[in-house]
Amino acid sequence: MSYQYSCRTISADGEAEEHSWSGIIFPEGGEDDDRLSLTDFVKQSISHGLSSIPELSLPSDIYLVAHFTRADVPGFSEFKDEALRGKMNLESVRSLFMNVGKSIGLDLPVTDGGKHHRIEVTLRDTMALAPNGATSLAQLGDILGFAKLQLSSDPEQELYYKEHMSEFLRDQPELFESYAIRDAEICALYTAKIIKLYHEKTGKFRLPVTLTSIGVDMIQNYWVSNRIDPLEIVGKEKITEKTWSKRYKRNVTRKRLVSKKKLHWSEDFFTECYHGGRNEQFWFGPGPEGVWYDYDLTSAYPSAMALIGIPDWSSIRPITSNSELLAAGEFRHNDLAFANVNFKFPESVKYPVLPVRTENGLIFPRQGNSTTHVSEILLAKELGCHIKLVEGRFISSKHGRDPLDPSALRSRVFEGFSRMCIEERRKYPKRTLDNLFWKELVNSTYGKTAQGLRERRIYNLRDAETKRLEPSKITNPVYAAFITAFCRGVLGEIMNGLPDHCSIFSVTTDGFLTNATDQEMMEAGGYLAGYYHAARSSLRSEEELRDLPARIYEVKHIIRQPLGWRTRGQATLKSSEQADWKGFEDEPKEDEMIVLAKGGIKLRRFLSKTEQNNEIVSLFLGRKPTDTLTVTLGAGIREMYEQGMDFVDNEMTKRLSMEFDWKRRPTQASDVAVDPGKGQHGSHLAFATEPWDTVDQFNKVRELWERYTKDDPKCLKTRPDYDDFAHYFEGMLAAEGSAQAWLRKSGGPLKRLRRDLIVAQKLRQAGTHQLKPQALGRTQIFPTKKLKAKELAEMLSDSFGVPCSKSDVDNARKIKVFKPYQVPRTEQTVRALKMIKKELFPYLVIDEFLTKSAEFNIAVRDL
């Protein structure tokens, strides 16, 4: 529809006059042939500046920056031509189009005589340069104090115009131009500020690819300025090697980075110690009403990073025994000690703290095998866990003195850099660019220590193949494993330290939702919380320490009633009230009074958080097994590049999945009343959970739930829904061979019991040879009476809950052999057989009917 631009000149020293200008270009029509070429767009944009600013010089290097290049770059005519598209040298970074290895060379005509001026154009994207939580242009505009324009004062009309821009152009062409140009102006102004910030802090006058790459450059600069070798500190060294070159047909000498020898020998072990954050849903369905606080650890990863001492990689050695691993004072919670252990927690521990990796994420069972950092192992010991060392490694840390001793010399890997970033950040007001820039730098450094440790593949546009994401310059499994384990440990310590009457609804990475009060949280911490507070203190100046609160967490949200269904799947049934924020926040924002994590569900764009929450609640409470969700997804970057496609929306219909993920074992369940307003009152299943005993239990439940719902989708909306699955599960786990087939049928276990009981009674087997006199109040029944088909059918149906008709009895009595152990052992069948033994067949041998006992079941008590 239009091509808008905002141009700015920038000088490295700031002494040259800097100019800016903006404009918009409308193509002649809406066909592909009417599109501007990249050369024409750049030419017209620069020509505008040259004609209006006489002193402007023709540039030789240009950054062409858009916000979400995946939508904008295909608008140039070159993208439709495969050969010309290849010359754009596009690469995919975070599924955005950019130039990384090579820029785009353009020849601009400057005179009528045919001369051309060569310029190099480098594509960048402000989405990759925006701080976390401010990735939209509107948010960037707010940060810059340069807000996006409104399309209408009516919210509904605003939304309509955003989804129908051609009508907006027709109805209000002048406002359309201003709106379009404003987007370009925000993008250009933000880019200029990032270039200047980067130049000021690194001395490099260029625009980096991502904001996180700035953090890597800056921490390496920091290390160099403090006489720390940036290779040595991450355990790497340069080696020279000769390799055969097909191009030159000879050996060539190349340098490359490799891990130091002793680190290399143990690198796989340390990588196994690296896990992500702790993410679990402890409650399914509507939670109890009350005041629920969403607590997050303050500056979680930077605080953990500040505890890491400078390693001596040559000192890596095995941990030799259980006594060495667990001896008091042998290893501190911030030492670089890691181990693989077998473990078993007491049943009294509500939240085991040793992670076990599965195909479906981390779980925290009561017993098993875990590979992790010593902070979690020592915490497990404090909780009474029995621990047996399998294998371990220890790395001594130079100058990694005890952080709990305020007089100790501190010289650690990340502490100085983190402190510098925090000091810089505090110089600027919240929500300003400089404040968010420094916050993002320190927070993103952790991610770079873990880059490339786990298999993650990205599509390479130039080579047209999927490749593994390469490690960053500071990737190190020791650091990544320590940081994540320590943060999980702090959370686990607080969670287990809360009083028994406190409930935890869910935990997500660096925080959890609980009804524990601020005072109860303060009193729940132990050694790890002490180390964490010391780390936070080490990142502050003496003046700031006087104002540093004793708490190591902050309240992100407060609500009155939560709704949960799976990991990262929570919503709000009742938001908080002003009185709930007393002592935390005088004027909470509307978004802070709602907890919402959509669990991967994508809703319509342009909805507010409150609107999204209402829609999610409606979806959950009103869902049916056959429900689908129409999801609008933009075309993928691979598909676009290979086919020369525009960024278009593709609608995809997906089955709505809002069921439990089974990472914990249900224990108590009931149907509870729900009244979120808007006429949605009713009831819904809710259940509390406890840890699984083993990983095998988790895997078995996941497997059987998938089998249970594969051909006949089901929802857990009522207590009977849950009990049906629990009966199926117990029977399937106990049954083998043909007995399993009955479990797949509606009412199958009771139907199989009916058949086998009738066969046994006809043949006088399994203790059915004698009746109870006057059974079920029927005076005509005596021990050796032969029951008629109709009589037996009525007894089974009316008295024992086993559906049966006269024809069922007649058909079963045709079977000539009684096969024992074929009735699926479920709560239903066991209960029915016990009643039948008590009231009808006193000598009934119950176990002759049932399959073997299940290893475990998922039956629940009433909530």
Image (cartoon, rainbow, N blue to C red):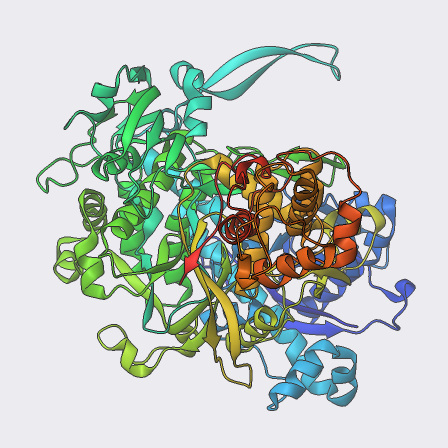
Q: Is residue 801 left or right of residue 88?
A: left
In the figure, residue 407 lies in which quadrant?
Answer: top left
Q: Residue at x 52, y 38 (%)?
A: 854
Q: Is residue 268 left or right of residue 798?
A: left
- Residue 374 is situated, as x and y percent measured from the top left of the image, at 29, 31
- Residue 212 is situated, as x and y percent measured from the top left of the image, at 48, 47
In depth, the one of 861 and 553 nearer the eye is 861
In depth, the one of 525 and 815 nearer the eye is 815
How many numbered circles are shown? 0
Q: Residue at x 74, y 84 (%)?
A: 168
In depth, the one of 501 and 747 nearer the eye is 747
User: In what quadrant of the picture does the C terminus appear?
Assistant: bottom left
User: In what quadrant of the picture does the N terminus appear?
Assistant: bottom right
Establish if 118 lies above or below 622: above
Establish if 165 lies above or below 76: below
Q: Is residue 859 left or right of residue 307?
A: right
Residue 530 visible in rendering: yes
- Residue 822 is situated, as x and y percent measured from the top left of the image, at 65, 37
- Residue 167 is situated, as x and y percent measured from the top left of the image, at 78, 83
In the figure, residue 503 lies in which quadrant?
Answer: bottom left
Residue 551 visible in rendering: no
In depth, the one of 252 and 737 nearer the eye is 737
Establish if 166 lies above or below 748: below
